[in-house]
Image (cartoon, grey):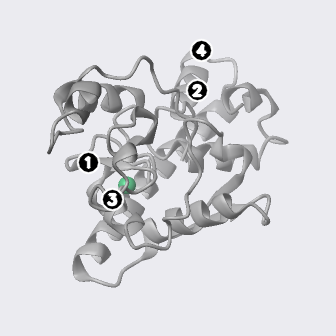
Amino acid sequence: MVKIERSYPAPESLASEALKRNGSYEKSDVTDRLKRDFHDKCYICELKGLQDPEVEHLLPHKNRTYPERVFDWDNLFWCCGHCNKVKNSGKYDAGIIDCCKQDPEQLLRFTLQDNDISVETIYPENEQALLTANLIYETFNLKNTGIREAACENRIQSLQVARNVLYRELEKYKEKPNSARNRRMVQSLLRRDSAFAAFKRGYVRERLDEFPELETCIC
Ligand SMILES: [Zn+2]
């Protein structure tokens, strides 16, 4: 999860759909904008190029029990179906970090391990950060159904591919740091719009003694 710059004003259909009895919060102006603002990535697991995107409500509307949440542009997020369902368990209803308002990388430490991930809170007393760390971990590890096992495996494998590309490009960069091509490649892999950016940026953040000049790419 990385900081997202949400664009304004809100898509026009939200105001008119809110006046209808069963209005839709998924008109194409909303989905097009969310896809663009969120860089075509699930804001929770950071899988890019979603085949099953969904419009997710940061604060759940519980079958429109909270109608004010349904069409609120600030409450709509771009999410994969897997993460949407994991988040929908009830235990995250108190609220996770709003990555459009707060920078998750300042609250959470994202670590890549050999075949797993870890997400830790930098401020354990921050309940939102704690919930968010747990949610992100679950989207890679909650394998309580066959479908979820496959979804988690898919995310871990995609993350490993992205990680290996980063390792390879960092090696090239270390060998020839003055190569414009090498620097450009590493920079693009560390941009917030890239897949699994929080984990890749976290990896470099822990190795700034080795790559001090890359600090500007991850702040
Ligand atoms: Zn996801």
Q: Quadrant of residue 173?
A: top right
Contact (Cβ within 8 Å) of mark 4 with mark 2: no
Q: Residue at x 29, y 55 (%)?
A: 64
Tell me which label, 3 or 4, sits earlier in the chain.
3
**Percent from the top left, x then y, of residue 43?**
44, 46
Compared to residue 28, the image places residue 61 above or below, namely below
**25 left or right of 160 in image:** left
User: Label 4 belongs to which residue?
Assistant: 180
Residue 115 seen in the figure? no
CB at disc 1 and ligand 1 closer than 8 Å: no
**Percent from the top left, x then y, of residue 33?**
32, 25
Please give the label number shown on residue 65. Answer: 3
Tag nearer the camera, 4 or 2: 2
- Specify the amino acid type for callout 4: Ala
User: Label 2 belongs to which residue?
Assistant: 187
Q: Secondary structure at mark 4?
A: helix
> Alpha-carbon distance for marks 4 and 1?
38 Å
Q: Secondary structure at mark 1?
A: strand
> Alpha-carbon distance for marks 1 and 2?
29 Å
Please give the label number shown on residue 148. Answer: none
- Specify the amino acid type for callout 1: Glu
User: Label 1 belongs to which residue?
Assistant: 54
